[in-house]
Amino acid sequence: MNAFDEAQEQLNRAIAVSPVTENLHTLLLKPEREIVVSIPIHMDDGSLRIFEGYRVQYSSLRGPYKGGVRFHSQADISEVRALAFWMTMKCAVAGIAMGGGKGGITVDPRSLSAAEIERLARGWVQAFYSLLGPDQDIPAPDVNTTPEIMCWMSEEYAKLTGDTRNATFTGKALTCGGSEGRSAATSAGGFYVFEALRPHIELPAHVKVAVQGMGNVGGGTAKIFREHGHTIIAMSDSRGGIYSAEGLDPAEVETYKKKNGNMKGFPNAQQISNEELLELPCDVLVPAALENQITKKNAEKIQAKVVLELANGPTATDADDILFKKGIAVIPDILANAGGVVVSTYEWEQNLKGEHWSEKDVLDKLCTLLERESKNVWERSVKLKTDLRRAAFSIALERLEEALRSKKV
Ligand code: NAD
């Protein structure tokens, strides 16, 4: 199954325990709009290359479309569609007044120079700017799109439209209207959700954590768990990972990786593959890279007590059932990684109001929201006697239904 089929399967499974009207179900089967474009870019050597770009505007039932832009060699319209669907559910479960969207470009950014990446980012905006805007569609960062890239996009949008409020792109650097706390928001949010659900899950006071993916989200998550006294036993990136029973310092691993290009040879650590990382005995497994990492092939071998899904769609649906039977709690992506979109929404609000909030204010507000919504999801799972994913979907669907009723579609 591709990511979109998986997403629809999750929807069907949630509807089976938490029915919705036929109208809502029908609306959620397809995106409202999806666009595929060719983006021509002049490369540094003078040649012209065409890159395929995407924007999927899945649902505007609860507000403007909201969702990141991914630069990845495997990105395609079906993946972007799935991610846009999950954004719809995520914004609803977080209770923010946003709909769901997502974007992407099929590209391996490691093969491009910084100047070529900048032209590509601006090219994406040139292709889509007429469909974007603070009341219409507000993109954000995702895999391989940095705060600097979001600044280029925001600046390009201002150039093309004359709208200089900076409220069309979020996840920007602080120098161009970004919010305090945005870069840490997804990982901090994941930690707040974990803490809120922790009383319901049997775990030792100090947990052993394995993190797959050490980008913005994975790196940040490893740091925040360590700051709270937990042990990071393994970390990885697309090239593989390292393991240390005594614990890794994520900041040191990051510095080492920057200097050496990868983690190979990191002192006092054992080299492991991404597959091995997922199967390590640990308390908390954090997939923070890409979709479809825990599948029916490896689910039986997962030894964690909790899977905290910081990536989008890391667990295949058939693996969900295996993990559930093994008593492993899966904290679903649409709740666990909602911190990013929530703080993106705070950034949008600050831009529109011309305000700049402190990091403490931003993270306190985020923590209050995620504690409340985690409690809601937990209570729903108890009420429906179901897993946390179906429970989170159930709450999201209820809120989408409310929006549909008020719109009288
Ligand atoms: P990023 O580009 O900063 O980092 C991605 C990391 O994953 C890199 O370390 C990369 O080496 C690693 N990776 C790629 N392929 C891998 C593989 N096959 N195995 C192991 N590692 C691999 O991206 P990010 O922003 O940290 O996003 C990571 C995940 O979190 C994605 O699923 C994204 O959709 C999700 N997410 C991100 C945000 C956000 O605010 N950035 C918000 C919500 C969800």
Image (cartoon, grey):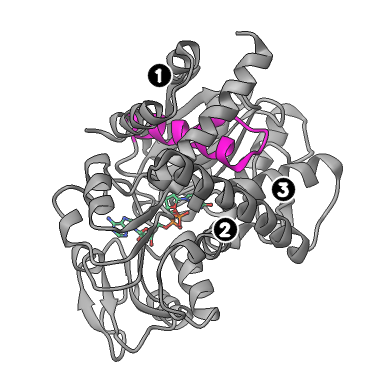
Residue identified by numbered label 2: 189
Q: Mark 1: which secondary structure?
A: loop
Q: Position of residue 5 (x, y in %)?
A: 29, 29
Of the numbered discs 3 and 1, the one sitting upstream in the chain is 1
Spatial CA distance of label 3 from label 1 is 30 Å
Residue identified by numbered label 1: 29
Q: Residue at x 26, y 53 (%)?
A: 323
Residue range (magenta): 76-102
Quadrant for the N terminus in the image: top left
On screen, residue 184 above or below 90: below
On the picture, is 58 further left or further right than 253?
Answer: right
Q: Magenta span: helix, strand or loop, mainly? A: helix
Circle 3 packing at 10 Å, graded few (<14), some (14-19), many (20+), is many
Q: Position of residue 3 (x, y in %)?
A: 31, 35
Residue 219 seen: yes
Residue 347's mark?
3
Q: Residue at x 29, y 61 (%)?
A: 238
Q: Position of residue 55 (x, y in %)?
A: 48, 28
Q: Quadrant of residue 265?
A: bottom left
Of the numbered discs 2 and 1, the one sitting upstream in the chain is 1
Task: Identify which residue, 397 or 110, lies in the foreground.
Answer: 397
On whether ligand 1 comes within 8 Å of the CB at mark 2, the answer is no
Q: Residue at x 60, y 58 (%)?
A: 185
